[in-house]
């Protein structure tokens, strides 16, 4: 018997996902306000440390059973998570938020297209390359993107790809506790870097409210909402909607940070979004094994 689709059951998780992406980018804009005092390194250390504390209180990961083998995958996952966060914040020191997120998206996009052999898939690769080409420094351009900042964002994208690979393996071994354990590992790895850069400023109580807000907006809220949306949306729909994140980041940068982009930069973001969107919509479903997005 045919049953009509309840529009509210579809719209609710979509709205949750949009709120999650907006929260994540809102947290990034707030994080930039801490750069002048403790730098990107210190901000990353505070965000991961506070996020790890919150997740450990909520999820109580000490209940899980750890073995030497499972700790290896957890260490790799946490290292990728820490590197992704640190390099992304490093890129925000000199690259507009929307462009940094677009460049970071090339990591999971490359991973999705790595084993592609169909002619259509090379269209998405070409679009992504075209977007990157538009962002390359040009001596005749009025506003250039810092090459080092671009390298940091691309490095964050590489860590994002590794985060997906190792996250799937760690998640299979540790289940719901993976996020808390991985964030804890990331915090332990990044905190010494932040401490070496910021020194005693890292422990300033004046920074705590903003740092806590960054941790909540950038970790607790988006991770929780994304998990709810992922369980209620098809994987392809989830991936398609996530492709809009660079555009949301660019709008947050424009509205909250007054980061104005020129035409070529908007075109570059659009090309990378189209590449991610096309890859998500035309991806072949896995037959033997289903891997969460």
Image (tube, rainbow, N blue to C red):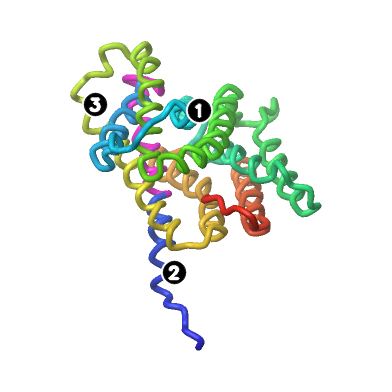
Residue 261 in view in this figure: no
Foreground of the two, 244 or 235: 235
In the image, residue 139 above or below residue 257: above
Q: Which residue does the image show at 52% across and 49% down from the upper left? A: 247
| Labels 2 and 1 touching (C-beta < 8 A) | no
Q: Quadrant of residue 186?
A: top left
**Residue position for label 1:** 91
- Residue 111 left/right relative to 198: right
CA–CA distance between discs 2 and 3? Answer: 39 Å
Of badges 2 and 1, the one in the foreground is 2
- Residue 168 left/right relative to 268: left
CA–CA distance between discs 3 and 1? Answer: 21 Å
SS assignment for the magenta stretch, majority: helix
CA–CA distance between discs 2 and 1? Answer: 35 Å
- Residue 262 left/right relative to 173: right
Q: In terms of secondary structure, where does tag 2 sit?
A: helix
Q: Quadrant of residue 25?
A: top left
Q: Which of marks 1 and 2 precedes in the sequence?
A: 2
Foreground of the two, 175 or 104: 175
Q: Which residues are magenta?
A: 21-41
| Labels 3 and 1 touching (C-beta < 8 A) | no
Q: In terms of secondary structure, where does tag 1 sit?
A: helix
In the image, residue 42 above or below residue 47: above
Q: Which mark is residue 271?
A: none
Q: Which mark is residue 207?
A: 3
**Residue position for label 2:** 10
Q: Which of marks 3 and 2 precedes in the sequence?
A: 2
């Amino acid at each position: 018997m045919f049953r009509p689709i309840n529009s509210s059951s579809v719209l609710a998780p979509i709205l949750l996902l949009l709120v999650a992406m907006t929260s994540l980018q809102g947290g990034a804009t707030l994080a930039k306000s801490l750069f002048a005092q403790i730098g990107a390194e210190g901000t990353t250390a505070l965000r991961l440390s506070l996020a790890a504390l919150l997740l450990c209180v909520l999820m109580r990961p000490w209940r899980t059973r750890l073995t030497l083998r499972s700790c290896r995958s957890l260490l790799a996952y946490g290292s990728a998570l820490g590197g992704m966060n640190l390099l992304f914040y490093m890129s925000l020191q000199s690259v507009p938020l929307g462009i940094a997120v677009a460049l970071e998206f090339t990591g999971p996009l490359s991973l999705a297209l790595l084993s592609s052999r169909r002619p259509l898939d090379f269209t998405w690769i070409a679009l992504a390359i075209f977007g990157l080409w538009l962002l390359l420094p040009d001596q005749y351009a009025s506003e250039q993107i810092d090459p080092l900042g671009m390298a940091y964002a691309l490095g964050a994208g590489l860590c994002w790809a590794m985060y997906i690979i190792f996250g799937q393996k760690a998640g299979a071994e540790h289940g719901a506790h993976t996020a808390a354990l991985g964030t804890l590992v990331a915090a332990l790895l990044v905190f010494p870097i932040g401490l070496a850069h910021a020194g005693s400023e890292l422990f300033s109580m004046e920074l705590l409210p903003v740092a806590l807000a960054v941790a909540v907006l950038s970790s607790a809220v988006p991770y929780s909402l994304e998990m709810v949306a992922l369980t209620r949306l098809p994987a392809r729909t989830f991936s398609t909607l996530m492709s809009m994140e660079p555009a949301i980041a660019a709008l947050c940068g424009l509205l909250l940070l007054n980061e104005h982009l020129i035409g070529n930069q908007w075109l570059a973001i659009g090309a990378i979004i189209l590449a991610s969107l096309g890859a998500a919509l035309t991806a072949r479903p896995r037959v033997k094994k289903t891997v969460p997005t």
